[in-house]
């Protein structure tokens, strides 16, 4: 078998692709910057520009061997409204963009009803809030007949079938969590037809790659929507089954906790009330509880404050911090809201190493508090895999080992794209070694 399995991750920062052979080995990588148009705190992207980039990176990694299967993961909430001819009716608004009509949802559906029905906190993030804003500000979107999350849109433009994947649909505010079906009240609020088809599980075959504008290396490959990027990354490192936790340390730290259903409405309400989300997983018959905090962003800001602007400088700072006390009597980080932080309690003798150790310990403590809340409502987790670029900092690695004594770590550089390639294998009928048999280790591979 000479063809490759291609995983595409349409991320907030980059559009990435990896090629994986049937043994599970990475054979090629490619990426491009995600082409957002930004103005005044807003961000949106031309849906067709995303298609062009994904075709490019996928063809580059497939190369002469070609693709047996293609799986697409990516950011949630962001999506594309199309008319009856699959033509985009508006730009795709970034998931973090402040545009969104929360007030109408709260008034017409009720905050508690929305959160217990969808498993999502009522904020501007869910797609429903973005769609209501578009309906009011872009009247042409009234002609929409379908909404595609980004991964679903790419698969469709590669020649695939119009499908809704469960983990992505769970982020839209358009899905009834308990029944895993489109929520009719949400579409009634939009005044539109059901914009989601009946959802399918990640890895389900969604047709074959076709089209004259598709590179030859990709044609004929089995297509699948791999699902929500955080969950697909957990799948890629073998942490997407009941009782598993994937602690991903990127710009945002994501705690991806997989559980077996059901969760009672009171459990869902308790989780969403604390800013966490509950949705269907990329593995059939599983739910995912997702919590996030700005660990990487906070550490990046502290590092810049200390003049540690390169990876080497931050690693050296982390090594120095290991000799500093884990708890300073007065120094602490204080949240100012909206992602703003203050450094409080600076006294004589506070060094860069002490400040770095204080920042690391504060973020790990907050992560621990979030995880304790999840475990209290879903039962204790039984295994942990930790990954992400910030794990290469010695001080954070040490703190995480103390937080998760039995943790496994991963050397997979792009777990989201890698997991998408594994789900492409499922769609293509290719047997790849089980996730926990691959590049998941007991130590960190330094880059």
Image (cartoon, rainbow, N blue to C red):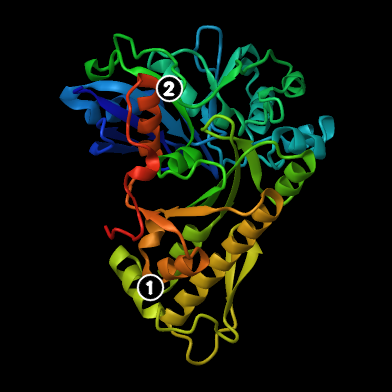
Viewer-proximal residue among 352 and 399: 399
Which residue is pictured at 39% across the width and 44% down the height?
436
Q: Residue at x 52, y 66 (%)?
A: 403
Residue marked by disc 1: 318
Write down the quadrant of residue 46 in the picture.
top left
From the viewer's perspective, is residue 57 above or below residue 243? above
Picture coordinates of residue 26, whole percent (x, y): 25, 39
Q: Where is residue 323 in the image (x, y as percent from the top left)?
A: 40, 83
Image mark for residue 44: none
Question: Helix or strand or loop: what does disc 1 sit on?
Answer: helix
Secondary element under disc 2, as helix, strand or loop, is strand
Q: In this view, does 79 lie above or below 387?
A: above
Q: Which mark is residue 224?
A: 2
Residue 225 x %, y %: 46, 25
User: Tag 2 or tag 1, which sits nearer the N-term?
Assistant: 2
- Residue at 83%, 29% (x, y): give it: 108
């Amino acid at each position: 078998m000479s063809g490759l399995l291609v995983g595409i991750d349409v991320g907030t920062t980059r559009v990435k692709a990896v090629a994986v052979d049937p043994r599970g080995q990475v054979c090629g990588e490619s990426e491009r910057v995600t082409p957002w148009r930004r103005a005044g705190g807003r961000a949106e992207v031309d849906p067709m520009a995303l298609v062009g980039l994904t075709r490019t990176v996928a063809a580059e990694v497939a190369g002469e061997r070609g693709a047996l299967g293609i799986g697409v993961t990516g950011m949630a909430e962001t999506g594309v409204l199309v008319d009856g001819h699959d033509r985009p009716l508006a730009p795709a608004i970034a998931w973090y963009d402040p545009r969104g009509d929360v007030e109408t949802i709260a008034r017409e559906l009720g905050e508690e009803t929305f959160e217990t029905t969808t498993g999502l906190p009522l904020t501007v993030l869910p797609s429903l809030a973005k769609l209501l804003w578009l309906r009011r500000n872009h009247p042409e979107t009234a002609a929409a007949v379908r909404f595609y999350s980004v991964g679903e849109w790419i698969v469709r433009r590669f020649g695939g079938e119009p499908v809704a994947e469960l983990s992505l649909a769970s982020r839209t505010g358009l899905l009834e969590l308990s029944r895993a079906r489109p929520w009719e009240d949400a579409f009634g609020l939009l005044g539109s037809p059901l914009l989601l088809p009946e959802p399918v599980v990640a890895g389900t075959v969604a047709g074959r790659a076709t089209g004259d504008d598709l590179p030859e290396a990709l044609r004929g490959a089995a297509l699948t929507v791999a699902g929500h990027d955080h969950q697909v990354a957990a799948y890629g490192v073998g942490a997407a089954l009941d009782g598993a936790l994937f602690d991903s340390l990127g710009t945002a730290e994501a705690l991806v906790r997989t559980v077996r259903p059901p969760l009672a409405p009171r459990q869902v309400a308790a989780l969403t009330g604390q800013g966490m989300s509950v949705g269907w997983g990329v593995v059939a018959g599983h739910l995912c509880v997702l919590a996030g905090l700005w660990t990487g962003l906070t550490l990046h800001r502290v590092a810049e404050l200390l003049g540690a602007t390169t990876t080497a400088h931050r690693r050296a700072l982390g090594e120095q911090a290991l000799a500093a006390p884990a708890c300073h009597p007065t120094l602490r980080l204080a949240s100012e809201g909206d992602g703003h932080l203050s450094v409080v309690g600076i006294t004589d003798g506070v060094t860069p190493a002490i400040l770095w150790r204080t920042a690391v310990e504060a973020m790990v403590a907050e992560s621990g508090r979030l995880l304790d809340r999840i475990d209290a409502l879903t039962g204790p987790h039984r295994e942990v895999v930790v990954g992400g670029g910030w794990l290469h900092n010695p001080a954070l690695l040490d703190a995480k080992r103390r937080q998760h004594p039995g943790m496994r770590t991963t050397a997979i550089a792009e777990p989201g794209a890698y997991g998408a390639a594994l789900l492409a294998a499922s769609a293509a009928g290719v047997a790849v070694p089980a996730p926990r048999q691959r590049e998941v280790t007991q130590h960190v591979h330094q880059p």
